[in-house]
Image (cartoon, coloured by chain):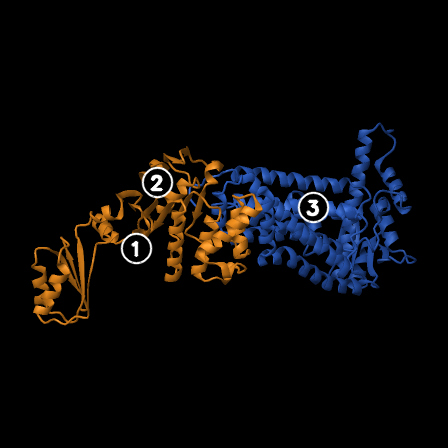
């Protein structure tokens, strides 16, 4: 498949700090690539370098097969960006903001009008067209931020943590909108430190830390990197130490933690663990409130790779 | 896209309350306060003839300028009479001053006037102002005459003093290029309004600064979004600045309308030239905003503070908070006012009001344009950068 973005040996250094260290990756046409990493891992810096906003020390960045420069207007006309910080004018209404940013790309007034209406529809701001940004809630403001970035129907869209500090309803709306954009043929680079979003949205994921790639692949491929295959959680009060020791003695168990209310057991292999645990609890007449099983998440992968949580 | 950006830049500027206050409302509020303060002074002083003394010595006898002007300003038959002047010896003048019979006296030492007061007040300020005005004008007249003598072949037996004497005779007949000093012309409130317009012109710098900041990726989030658009950066900046300039001219027009029709300020007959100077002044203000936005590495608020601070200081030195400041600076540190755009604007208006020739006016217009283009040229090197080390 055709590469929309090609990055080779990208290096960006801020004095002593290497924000991006020899980064190389590609983004295929029509895919959603997730850049996953904790704060300060280099996600936004990578995007700013790709967009030619930041100088970089070394490397080659190509978009649509051409080297990206500040005056690459033909390339820029096909790109949309949703920045992490809300980038709209407080003095313009919702409609005016979208129309203004769309107008930097689309000359024809009629086309632009249609595109603006489409964007408003996509992010669900139809009832707020005449509102000024200060009158919008955080979630609605984020949706406006997205509409301003995608109204001109770009072929390549960068989403830089678009759901930070957003309520669940707006988050779902945003994620649905991004899926629609992908279905309409856009190539998307999505940065986040929320692994759930990456798991829902992305075809491929790159895990970044300290400006380097720790791992990349599909979510399933990455999960295989985790040492564990299953996690079983039991909500149980006042569990005696002897039971915990018994569970630990199972060869398939990797780790057992208990905080007085929740028992968390991780397993190296993921077969029949939930059933076995229920049987054991019954046999020992231990009363519990809730029990459930989970597959490892990307956070477990990240933990495995770096020894720290994604949100650290 | 140029018009699209221009239209929306104009909208954002006109809807920005902070900008509207500083560029539109603040000058009007200040103008109203000036009017309240100075119209009272003007009314109070209207019928108050100021008692002064002039030391009658040989230096005065030989100086036609001081003799003629004070004679005119003390003419009992004139409606514009300003002074009740006693020509006395220095000892008598001192005695009169001690007894509070006069507000002060002037003694010429050579060509240098020395004014003595024991108290400070409006009458003393006016007296001092008139003396300094005569000194400045007679000095300028001497310079003009000397210059003309050097430029053309003049008979060597005609001396400067003689020409000056003739020039003063002409002044009495209203045939000389310099207007004579009368009570009307001495309306120092006008200088306050000139500096007010200068301030309004220079406050337009805030509009220029905002217009630039909105387009810079390292300054605002909107700037980041605009910078990644396919619109040419130069086009963006020029259309945004043009919007800032138009907004500024609208603000100035409001100020003019308000001062003329509400405050009844008489700007004289040169409306076209006043508009031209205001437009050039506004352009200079805009260029200051561009320079601060592009060259100063600070937050938006800090940049606004710097710009307002520079403007207020410039206006203060140009005489906004006291007419005498302009003369103090002109006399002691003339280079400051030569480089002070607020003074260039004020002085341009002043020259329109006081002189029949336009040389000084055009000198100020040219100075403002040069000042503005230098700032824009310096800013250009910073603005042409399209990538940043950090944002």
Residue occupying image coordinates x 59% and y 57%: B15
Quadrant containing the C terminus of chain A is bottom left
Residue farthest toward the top in the current orientation of the protein: B153
Indicate the position of residue B249 as horizontal and vertical percent values: 68, 50
| Chain A colour as displayed | orange
Determine whether, in the image, residue B290 is placed left or right of residue A213: right
Answer few, some or many: residues within 10 Å of disc 1's Cα (few below 14, many 20 plus, some between 14 and 19). few
Q: Nearer the viewer, mark 1 or mark 3?
A: 1
SS at mark 3 in the image: helix
Residue occupying image coordinates x 62% and y 38%: B373
Q: Nearer the viewer, mark 3 or mark 2?
A: 2
SS at mark 2 in the image: strand
Q: Is residue B116 visible?
A: no
According to the picture, the residue beneath numbered tag 2 turns out to be A27
Along the line of sight, which residue is nearer the eye, A197 or B22?
A197
Circles 2 and 1 on the same chain:
yes
| Chain B colour as displayed | blue
Residue B279 bears which disc, if any? 3
Determine whether, in the image, residue B206 is placed left or right of residue A158: right
Check the residue under mark 3 and report the chain it is in: B
Along the line of sight, which residue is nearer the eye, B133 or A261?
A261
Residue A196 bears which disc, if any? 1
Residue occupying image coordinates x 46% and y 48%: A150
Check the residue under mark 1 and report the chain it is in: A
């Amino acid at each position: 498949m055709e590469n929309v973005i090609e990055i080779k040996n990208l290096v960006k250094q801020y004095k002593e700090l290497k924000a991006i260290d020899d980064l190389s990756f590609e983004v295929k046409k029509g895919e959603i690539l997730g850049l996953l990493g904790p704060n300060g891992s280099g996600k936004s810096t990578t995007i700013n370098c790709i967009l030619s906003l930041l100088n970089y020390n070394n490397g080659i960045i190509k978009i649509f097969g051409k080297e990206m420069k500040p005056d690459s207007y033909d390339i820029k006309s096909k790109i949309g960006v949703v920045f992490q910080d809300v980038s709209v004018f407080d003095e313009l209404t919702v409609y005016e903001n979208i129309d203004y940013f769309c107008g930097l790309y689309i000359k024809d007034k009629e086309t632009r009008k249609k595109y603006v209406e489409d964007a408003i529809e996509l992010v669900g701001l139809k009832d707020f067209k005449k509102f000024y940004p200060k009158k919008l809630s955080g979630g609605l403001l984020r949706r406006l931020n997205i509409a301003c970035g995608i109204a001109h129907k770009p072929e390549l869209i960068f989403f830089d943590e678009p759901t930070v500090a957003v309520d669940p309803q707006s988050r779902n709306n945003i994620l649905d909108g991004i899926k629609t954009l992908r279905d309409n043929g856009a190539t998307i680079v999505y940065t986040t430190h929320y692994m759930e979003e990456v798991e829902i949205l992305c075809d491929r994921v790159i895990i970044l830390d300290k400006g380097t790639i720790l791992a990349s692949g599909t979510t399933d491929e990455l999960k295989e990197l985790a040492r564990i295959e299953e996690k079983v959680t039991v909500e149980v009060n006042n569990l005696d130490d002897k039971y915990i020791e018994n569970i630990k003695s199972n060869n398939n168990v990797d780790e057992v933690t208990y905080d007085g209310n929740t028992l968390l057991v991780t397993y190296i292999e993921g077969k029949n663990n939930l059933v076995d645990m229920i049987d054991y609890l019954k046999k020992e007449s231990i009363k519990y409130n809730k029990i459930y099983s989970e597959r490892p998440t990307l956070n477990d992968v990240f933990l495995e790779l770096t020894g720290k949580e994604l949100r650290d | 896209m140029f018009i699209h950006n221009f239209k929306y830049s104009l909208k954002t500027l006109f809807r920005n309350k902070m900008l509207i206050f500083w560029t539109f409302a603040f000058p009007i509020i200040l103008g109203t306060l000036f009017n309240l303060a100075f119209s009272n002074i003007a009314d109070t002083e209207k019928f108050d003839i100021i008692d002064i003394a002039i030391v009658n010595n040989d230096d005065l006898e030989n100086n036609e300028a001081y003799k003629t002007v004070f004679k005119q300003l003390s003419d009992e038959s004139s409606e514009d009479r300003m002074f009740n002047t006693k020509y006395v010896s220095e000892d008598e003048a001192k005695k009169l001053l001690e007894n509070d019979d006069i507000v002060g006296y002037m003694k010429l030492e050579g060509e240098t006037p020395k004014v003595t007061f024991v108290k400070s007040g409006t009458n003393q300020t006016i007296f001092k102002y008139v003396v300094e005005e005569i000194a400045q004008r007679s000095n300028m007249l001497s310079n003009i005459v000397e210059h003309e003598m050097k430029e053309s072949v003049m008979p060597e037996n005609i001396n400067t003093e003689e020409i000056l004497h003739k020039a003063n005779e002409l002044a009495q007949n209203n045939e000389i290029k310099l207007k004579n000093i009368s009570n009307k012309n001495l309306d120092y409130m006008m200088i306050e309004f000139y500096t007010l317009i200068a301030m309004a012109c220079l406050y337009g710098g805030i509009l220029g600064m905002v217009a630039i900041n909105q387009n810079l990726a390292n300054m605002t989030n909107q700037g980041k979004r605009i910078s990644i658009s396919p619109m040419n950066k130069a086009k963006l900046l020029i259309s945004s600045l043009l919007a800032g300039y138009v907004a500024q001219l609208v603000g100035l027009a409001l100020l003019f309308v308000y001062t003329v029709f509400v405050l009844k300020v008489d700007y004289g007959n040169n409306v076209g030239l006043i508009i031209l100077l205001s437009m050039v002044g506004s352009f200079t203000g805009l260029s200051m905003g561009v320079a601060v936005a592009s060259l100063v590495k600070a937050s938006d608020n800090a940049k606004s503070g710097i710009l307002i601070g520079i403007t207020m200081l410039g206006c203060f030195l140009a005489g906004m908070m006291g007419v005498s400041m302009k003369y103090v600076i002109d006399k002691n540190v003339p280079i400051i006012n030569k480089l002070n755009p607020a003074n260039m604007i004020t002085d341009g208006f002043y020259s329109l009001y006081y002189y029949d020739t336009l040389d000084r006016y055009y000198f100020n217009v040219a100075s403002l344009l040069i000042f503005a283009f230098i700032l824009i040229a310096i800013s250009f090197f910073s603005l042409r950068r399209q990538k940043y080390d950090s944002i």
